[in-house]
Image (spheres, rainbow, N blue to C red):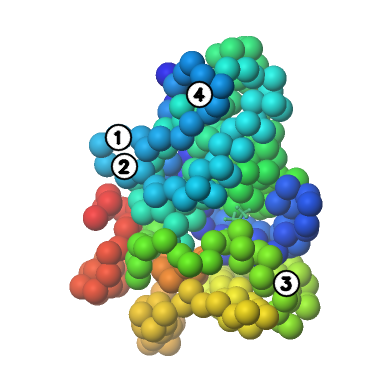
Amino acid sequence: MIKGQAPSNIALIKYMGKIEGTGNKPTNASLSYTLPHLVTEVHLHEIDGDQDQWAPLELKGFAAPELSEKGRSKFLGHFERLKQAWGLSGHYRIESANNFPSDCGLASSASSFAALTQAAAHLREQKTGVRTSPEELSVLSRKGSGSSCRSFFAPWALWENEGAEAVDLGYPDLLHAAVVISAGVKEVSSSDAHVRVTSSPRFEGRVDRAHQRLRDLTSALKERNWSESYRLCRDEFIDMHELFETSAVPFKYRTKESSDVTDACQHIWNHKGDGPLVTMDAGPNVHLLFRADQRELADKMIEHFRKKHMTFTSWRGLK
Ligand code: DP6
């Protein structure tokens, strides 16, 4: 049996919009923070038969995702691509599970596709003795699911074109919390969202806005300008959600409860002149990143949010 494990990541400058027919090459560069406490594990078992299969992995502390037919074939299709790329033969039962809920805006596709790519690379190494570099893993994983290409680098990953790379922006030990408004499967997948946003009138200029923000955020983080970083991250996730909400057939992930959480964070910032970075992916949940020296504030805020919502943190184990 071969194992692979990979973390999730949260984008602060978002991958939203892809160049058609390029295997998930993005219309704009993105920047993410890797979340080592939110992981997918994949096990590969060689089987007789003429097809690969997917099955839920039973592992303590992990839960298998509810994979739709489409999700399953995307996952198996990625494995087939990896086998072809590396000349691997045989068929396998692919078992996978996450230690966090999937399909709810916690970027489970990033960790699952990265973990599958990692597992296949271990298989390659076992069969051929060839090791795969993180750069190659990133480029191949991107073809399965774009955001997964950033999960091979930590703490920061920058993805501009073929694959991601590590970037040094300081803050190696940010605390992460995800306030889970809903752990249900979302109605519009992020893959569909990538297509639908291009019909928004706001998509014009999106690439320039994202790139300008990427430059500004990179500088702000390097200069340790935390409040400017907060402002840019906020503008960015709002920009992305406005694309969803203004596409030709509009769709919405933000709920009243998501806004209550982001408003509460803004209130803290207004009051204290300090607070966490706040962002949302293609889902209703809210991600917070605190500096290590904000531990006390983080504990207080999490205690507050936990009264209403399931909240995962990187510093107290999973709750
Ligand atoms: C909103 O990587 O899930 O999380 O390439 O079609 O699999 P596919 O899309 P996916 O898109 C993630 C979009 C996002 C923003 C981000 O992670 O950058």
Q: Is residue 202 positioned above or below 148 on the image? A: below
| Circle 1 crowding by C-alpha within 10 Å: few under 14, some 14–19, many from 20 | few
Task: Name the residue beneath numbered marker 1.
Answer: 59
Q: Secondary structure at mark 2?
A: loop
Q: Amino acid at mark 2?
A: Phe
Residue 136 image position (x, y, % from top left): 69, 33
Q: Secondary structure at mark 4?
A: strand
Q: Amino acid at mark 3?
A: Thr
Q: Amino acid at mark 4?
A: Tyr
Q: Amino acid at mark 1?
A: Leu
Q: Is mark 3 within 8 Å of ligand 1?
A: no
Residue 216 image position (x, y, % from top left): 68, 70
Query: What distance separates the C-alpha of mark 1 from that of mark 3?
Result: 40 Å
Task: Name the residue beneath numbered marker 4.
Answer: 92
Query: What distance separates the C-alpha of mark 4 from that of mark 2?
Result: 21 Å
Query: What distance separates the C-alpha of mark 1 from that of mark 4?
Result: 19 Å
Left or right of residue 300: residue 21: right
Which quarter of the rendered picture does the C terminus lie within? bottom left
Task: Name the residue beneath numbered marker 3.
Answer: 198
Left or right of residue 257: residue 316: left
Left or right of residue 263: residue 20: right
Quadrant hosting ligand 1 = bottom right
Q: Which circle marks residue 62 in the picture?
A: 2
Question: Pointers 4 and 3 in contact (CB under 8 A)?
Answer: no
Q: Is residue 166 positioned above or below 96 on the image? A: below
Q: Earlier in the sequence, mark 4 or mark 2?
A: 2
Res 277 visible: no
**Looking at this rendering, what residue extends furthest in the left direction?**
307
Left or right of residue 69: residue 137: right
